[in-house]
Image (cartoon, coloured by chain):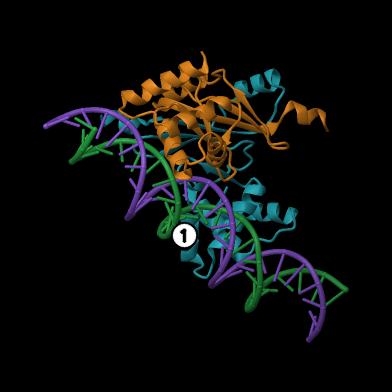
Chain colours: A cyan, B orange, C purple, D green
Amino acid sequence: MTVENRIESIKKELQKQSYKLTPQREATVRVLLEHEEDHLSAEDVYLLVKDKAPEIGLATVYRTLELLVELKVVDKINFGDGVSRFDLRKEGAEHSHHHLVCVECGSVTEIVEDLLEDVEKIVEHRWKFKVQDHRLTFHGICEQCQSND
Amino acid sequence: MTVENRIESIKKELQKQSYKLTPQREATVRVLLEHEEDHLSAEDVYLLVKDKAPEIGLATVYRTLELLVELKVVDKINFGDGVSRFDLRKEGAEHSHHHLVCVECGSVTEIVEDLLEDVEKIVEHRWKFKVQDHRLTFHGICEQCQSND
DNA sequence: TCATAATTTATAATCATTTTAATTTGACAC
DNA sequence: GTGTCAAATTAAAATGATTATAAATTATGA
């Protein structure tokens, strides 16, 4: 899936709900696409978008991100430092993916695999809870930091 | 385990690191003990502590909660609304427990069982990541709200 | 073209949290 | 007991992320 195709598909997603893909929104989406592996804060996104479109305002970035979260195009995650971070959701993925946060170096690794199918079934049966989404984060020491000790 | 015993054991935990259980800290811990099932924000805790000890300051509550998080006596969790919430950790529990957040009524249900043992093993093997703690939250519809439809 | 609604911008406001500086408390040495 | 020092607390101000507001701009459709 090329960048252009993904932009196109996000555009359709927006239009379905009668939102438009304005230049500012497109620039924001492009930044997210170009940094899929990072976990950018709103401020980060803002600064990067400013390179492409210097006249954009911070508030617009916030509103765009909020909109994209609503459309489930991006996930808003929170690692306990004061800021929210924004992740493009993989094309067609049902759930937000998981993260490994290293408490030493602060690195964040993505887990795309859905490891929670069984757990989800248990929750749905035992607690009669209809799961829509989940959020799983492990805190610990990453491989790199283990070997550095 | 009575309230007094738990206070005593938390006191020992503090002293081990040469912190003291001041009256303000004790009042804060008591509030947490009396609201184990709720998920209080710092502000909530502050208001409740104020009933017992009206002269306490908000900053002290924040500092106390921070300290208790450091000692792993309480867990700091975050459900995506703007505030952090604070949960007493069960006596001797290794990990912070899980939560079911209902997107309709906002209720939060606790899961004390550790459902992640298998997942944790996979993560340790496949990603060579040494897990210290985890955070799992499901978002969905609770039993109550399902029947109300 | 004109009118209306959506969007954006810049700025100000808000809210949670942290820092600061001054004061208080408590433990210990004398 | 008194004096001293470090830890803890208080109140107030500062910070930083996020949201709301009002005015200006842009797109849309009759």
Q: Is residue B94 above or below residue B136?
A: above
Q: Is residue A35 above or below residue B63?
A: below
B76 on left or right of B128: right
Position of residue A73 measured from the top left corner of the image (x, y, whole percent): 62, 47
Q: Quadrant of the C terminus of chain B?
A: top right
Q: Is residue B116 above or below residue A86?
A: above
Position of residue C14 measured from the top left corner of the image (x, y, whole percent): 59, 57
Position of residue B52 measured from the top left corner of the image (x, y, whole percent): 53, 33
A29 on left or right of A145: right
Name the subunit of mark 1. A
Name the residue type under label 1.
Answer: Leu
Nearest the eye: A122 or B22: B22
Q: Is residue A12 above or below residue A22?
A: above
Per the image, the residue denoted by label 1 is A48
- Farthest residue to the top: give it: B1
Q: Residue at x 56, y 51 (%)?
A: A2
